[in-house]
Structure formats: structure tokens, C-alpha cells
Amino acid sequence: MNEGNKITINDVAKAAGVSKGTVDRVLHNRGEVSAKSRDRILKVIEELGYRPNFYASILASRKNYTISCIIPEFNDGEFWELTEKGIDQGREYAGRFGITINAVMYDQYDLDSFQNACAKVLASDPSGVVIAPMFRNETLKFAKELSERHVPYVYIDSKLEEDGYLAYYGMPMYQSGYLCADILTDGRDVRKVHIIRIARDKRGLSDPTVTRRTGLIDYIAEHYPDCRIENTFIDPKSREERYRKLDGMFAADPDPDKYIVMCNSRVHFVADYLRDRGIRTCRVVGFDVLDRNLSALRDGYVQALIAQHSDRQAASAITAITDYLILHTVPQKKDNYTQMDILNKYNCDYYI
Amino acid sequence: MNEGNKITINDVAKAAGVSKGTVDRVLHNRGEVSAKSRDRILKVIEELGYRPNFYASILASRKNYTISCIIPEFNDGEFWELTEKGIDQGREYAGRFGITINAVMYDQYDLDSFQNACAKVLASDPSGVVIAPMFRNETLKFAKELSERHVPYVYIDSKLEEDGYLAYYGMPMYQSGYLCADILTDGRDVRKVHIIRIARDKRGLSDPTVTRRTGLIDYIAEHYPDCRIENTFIDPKSREERYRKLDGMFAADPDPDKYIVMCNSRVHFVADYLRDRGIRTCRVVGFDVLDRNLSALRDGYVQALIAQHSDRQAASAITAITDYLILHTVPQKKDNYTQMDILNKYNCDYYI
DNA sequence: TATTTTTCCGTTACCGAGCACGGAAATAAA
DNA sequence: TTTATTTCCGTGCTCGGTAACGGAAAAATA
């Protein structure tokens, strides 16, 4: 609202008995103001409820703000593509305030790559940072550096156990696993659940879906104490390997009505297998709205997807920093858990 | 982006060999410009890719834009409350551009009240209008008047079969009914579905949920050809009357495992009844996230809710008009169907 | 006390656009 | 041809801040 707020910097100056130059100096902590007039001006600002007009401000100051976004690199159709879309949305908003957004990608399986990305961003002297962290220690170090430089930063996707960040936007991981189990079992007489997991070759990598899997397992334990859980590891790089593993899984379990779940966005691997083998008797649930997952959903090889608007997470992160830089406002809530969307073949086409 | 775009009105003036005053005149069609220089200026603007700086613009022009929102009035906890929240969000966005939002409510069961609201809005000479229409003919008349005055207007919730509107934000009603039926039946052996409907005393009112009910019925017919559908009408004003009707319904149908659905936001009526009667054997599905519906969901008297972000619809509508007024941009898509959210007890707490 | 150095603050020229005002040039009327 | 009207356009002030510049007053030093 700009209505009653017609108080300008000149009004403040007049009321404080100084010139607007002096008021501007205290507004921006530019020094060269005596303690006495500083206090007086501050008091007047308070009393009058002065709020600077940010159009005038942006117009006059030829500042060049930059927000850097650090996210994992990706191929077409992969999870992080949606995040990049959100960055584009954020760019549009921030662009209106003359803020430049630049995205820096890293290999989420390579620590060096992450370090490089962080170093590059630090070197570019950003006004704000959005980060999707994958390596705990490195991120903590990075966050500390940002804090010391008073650079605001926002976590997306996941966050760390420190509290220097301006905000966090992500999904409640544990609950998403719990929810997923509920949808998978669907009140039926479930005796066994197959969790398909990605075989991770490199050690020392934090698996972001472990919390989710815990939620899943807890639900099963609470609601289906007699239900067995079986893990099958597949290789994201090799189709043949995957098919061999899944063939093995099907051979070992004679029951054709299987309950299959994946805790990450790669459920299309399972769907492809089922399609090729002509298997339609399984109930399959996975996560995230990749194109390949959606078509599996439409074709009936996947019954449900749990989705999150990771685009909105990124966009909100950029908006938060923009508002912080321009309007000097802090997000209403620091930790923002985005909703968990349940998609099936009847509502997925309207998911935007 | 404002980066490469450093071309100012002065650059244009210089390039066209006129003064900025003249450029400004053609920019705002204020006349008093010869056809010759007009064309030249237009050409230069095109060539240079000039985009006016809207900070400067807003700062200089002391215009007073107002957007009026016409929605049904409501009591605490009712459906339209969420829309009003969205209006507040929109107000915050629009407020940044010095735009005032004012909401005008009407009695959705009273034509006169709607007419009054429209007349009042027209009299206030708004810069833009957001409307949730309930009365077809009156709305058409109103829309025509707005078109003639070149006042942009946006439909929310539902729209009409004319195309003068700037945008529309709402739920796909038919599909929501279809989806609802899928969730209600849930792949089970359903023989009978009870639709609980609100008894409408006044005639001539368009029931916005009729399309939704059609989708519901179509799904049943396609997937459960032998399933019977039974309608029960209840009175929103009288609890006793409702209980009598529902008692009757339960008495007439001996099967305790009933499938019950409501196509509007009042499913809490059913939940209250079930709670009071201690009935936990039914599967109940309804619409919209009222507080009373949510607690019914948590307590297990309702199994699922189909929700829409009607707050975002309103906020988007206001954003669209704001951007149209300030940035002179038109929404990417004219018809925007918001996603249908499936809520159960495990994800409803994260629905925001 | 005279001089140098700091501290502190007012003045002023912008930023990019909107618009009122007044006047020159072109046209119409005398 | 002179005068009255139009048509058309440039000038200059404004909006609310930003920040460089320079100078007066106060403090420090000689």
C-alpha cells in the first residue's frame, strides 16, 4: 500500500531540521552524520512511518544486483529441469527490479564440481544466492562465508542444520514417504512391498531420499506389521542391467500383483520395463512429474505420482531474495514446506 | 530484463530528430503530432527496441488505478473466504505499483444484489475488474459494458461463453467430477453411490456444480455400468432437517459401507452427521479445503478432498490485470485451469 | 593564537518519464 | 497581404531518491 504513505524523504528532512542529503546518509549508513542528528532523523522516520519509494530508489541508484543459483546439472527431462524453469520465472520477476539471475550448475555426484561452483559464485561477488545443496560440509563452509559477507542465501530442495539462511523452500521428505506408502498400499491386503533403488557407485554421497524412505518404511511398519519390504538395486546407466535385475525380482516372487515403489524421480525405469514385458498387474508409485513419468501414468504403468512444485520453490527463493534486496523485507516464514501433490491419470493433465 | 535495454525516451527522440515531449505524445496517443513524425518515431522505437522504464513512468505519473473484485459474500470458514485471502495477496502485489484493490461482495442467491454490485463497480470507474460470476445474463451485460469502456476484466471460478475477457482462472469442473468419482470408487466393487446435494429453494439460479456432477456421473457410467446413483437433498439452513434426511437415507439402504459424495464444499455436513451417529464405515469424498472439511479429513470421516487453490486464482487474476495496466503485457494463456489437488489425511497439513 | 585536519552537512545535478505551457510554423480567414 | 486559427512541437518543471562535491564549523595540531 502506498496510499496514506505519502511521506517523502523531504518531509523527513524538514521534520528533522536537516537536508534530505543527510537523511539519505543515515538511511544507507553512509556515515558522515553526527550521532545527534542521526538519532533525531531515525526518530522522525519512526514517527512519520516513512517508507522509501522504491521506484524512485531504483531509478536513482544505478546499482547492479546479481543473484546466483547453484543447482545440479541435468539432461533433458530430468528432475532438475523443472527447477530451472522456476529459475526462469524468478528471473522474470527479479528482472523487473533490474536484478540479474545467473544459474551455476554442478555435477551432483562430484564434490570437486560443487566446490568449483561455490568458488565461482563467491568470486562473482553476488548480491544473493539460491542453493540446492548436495554436499553437507562444503555447503556449511560456503554458507558461513556468505554469512560473513552478509550475502543473503536461500536453500531449496533440502537444507542444512544451521540457521544463517534467509529462507528454505522444499518438500517435507519424511512425510512424502509416509504419504507415498499410504497411496501405494491403498487400504489393500499388502504382504510385500518392493522398493527399487538406484545403485550408487560412489561413496560418501548423501542420498537425499533416505529420509523419504524412512517415512515409507515407518508407514508400512505401523499399518502393515506383517508386510515384507524388499530392496532391489538398479543401475541408471544400463538398461540391460536394470532389466536383468527386475527379471530376477519377478522370478523370485511368484505373486504377479506386486507393489512397487521408487523414492526418487526415476520410476519411469520401472514403467519402461513393465511396458516392454507387458506386465499390467502391478501397483506402482513414484515421485515427480518428469515427462516420462507422466506418460507412464497416462498409460497405466504407474498408478500415482507424488509431486512437488520444485519450480515454485526456485521461483519463491528468487522472489524472497529480490524482495529482501529491494524492499528490505524478510519472508513471512523461514521454513516453507511445499505441498505434496498426488497425481493420477485423471488430474495429471491439469498439473501446472 | 533491463540490461541491454538502456534506450531511453531521449535516445528515441534524438534518433527521430524530435524532442522527448513529442515521443511521449505518440507513446500515449495524446495527439498533436503530425503523421510524418509519428511514423518516424514509431519506426525508431521499433528499430531501437525501446521499452519504457516503468519505474520512471510510475514515479512521474500520479495515476490512481483501482481494481474491483466482485465475489460472493460469505461467512467465516466458507468457500469464498479463501478467494478473499487471494485477493489480499493480489493486493500486496498490486499495491507495489500504487494500485488499489477493492472487493465488492454480493449475495450469490440474490440477483438484485449482484446487479447492485455491478452497478456500484461501474459507477466507481475502475481500471480493471475481477469477477466471479453467478448470474449469466447480468454478467454478460456487465462484461459488454466493460468491453465498451475498454476496462480489462478477468473471470475467476467460472467463466462465460464470450471472449472479451483478459483471462480466466478456474478449475476444470467436469474433470474434477470425473476425478472425484475415481477417488471415491477407488477400484472397489461399488454398487451404489450416494450424491448429497444442497436443496435449492430459489428457481432460476445456475448451479455451478452441475458440470462437476455430470463428470462424476459419466465416470460411474463408464466404469461401473451397474452402479446405482442416488440423490439426497439436504437443507443447508437446518441441522435437524439434514439429519432427518440422512437418517432416511441410511434406513433405506441396508448396506453399511456406503459411498457418499458431495460436489460442493459442504461435505462437512455429512461428516458432522457421521461423527454424531458414530458411523465410520462409509467412504466419503468432497471438495475444497474449509477448516471444517479438513478436520473431518483428519478425523477420518472424510477420506479425500479435491481442492483447488482458489486463492491463487484470485491472486493471479489481480496480477494479470496489474501487469496489463503497468507493463502492458497480456497473460501468456487466456484460459488457465488450475490444478486439482487430492488431499487425504497424510498430505493435508502441508497444503498451503 | 594561527593553521591544519576532521567532522558534518547542504547543494545540486542526475535517473527516465509525464505533462502543462507557450510559442513557432503552417494554414485558414479577412 | 494581413490577421486569426490551427497544428505541431520544444522547454522545463515534477516525481522521490542517490550521491558526488564542496564548504562551514568543530576539533586537533603547531
Image: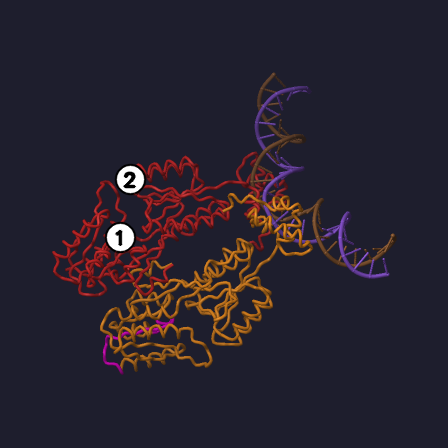
Chain colours: A orange, B red, C brown, D purple
Disc 2 chain ID: B
Assess whether residue A259 is covered by the magenta stretch.
Answer: yes
Disc on res. B110: 2
The answer to whether dots 1 and 2 both sit on one chain is yes
Q: Residues within 10 Å of mark 1 (few under 14, many from 20)?
A: many
Badge 2 amino acid: Asp
Residue A290 in which image quadrant: bottom left
Q: Is residue B54 left or right of residue B137?
A: right
* Vertical side of C28 occupied by B231: above or below: below
Residue B16 in which image quadrant: top right
Residues A277 and B316: in front is B316
Please state the horizontal and vertical placement of residue B312, each as a whole percent of the image. Answer: 39, 53
Question: Element type at marker 2?
Answer: loop
Residues B29 and A218: in front is A218
The residue drawn where x is 39% and y is 67% is: A172
Please state the horizontal and vertical placement of residue B195, each as a whole percent of the image. Answer: 20, 54
* Vertical side of A120 occupied by B334: above or below: above
Question: Element type at marker 1?
Answer: loop
Query: Magenta residues?
Result: A252-269
Assess whether residue B80 is covered by the magenta stretch.
Answer: no
The residue drawn where x is 45% and y is 48% is: B91
Of the two numbered discs 1 and 2 on the same chain, state the one appearing first in sequence.
Answer: 2
The residue drawn where x is 58% and y is 64% is: A150
Q: Which residue is mark 1?
A: B266
Please state the horizontal and vertical placement of residue B245, each as a whole percent of the image. Answer: 16, 51
Query: From mark 1 to mark 2, how far is it between C-alphas?
Result: 20 Å
Residues A165 and A113: in front is A165
Say if residue A95 shows up in the picture.
yes
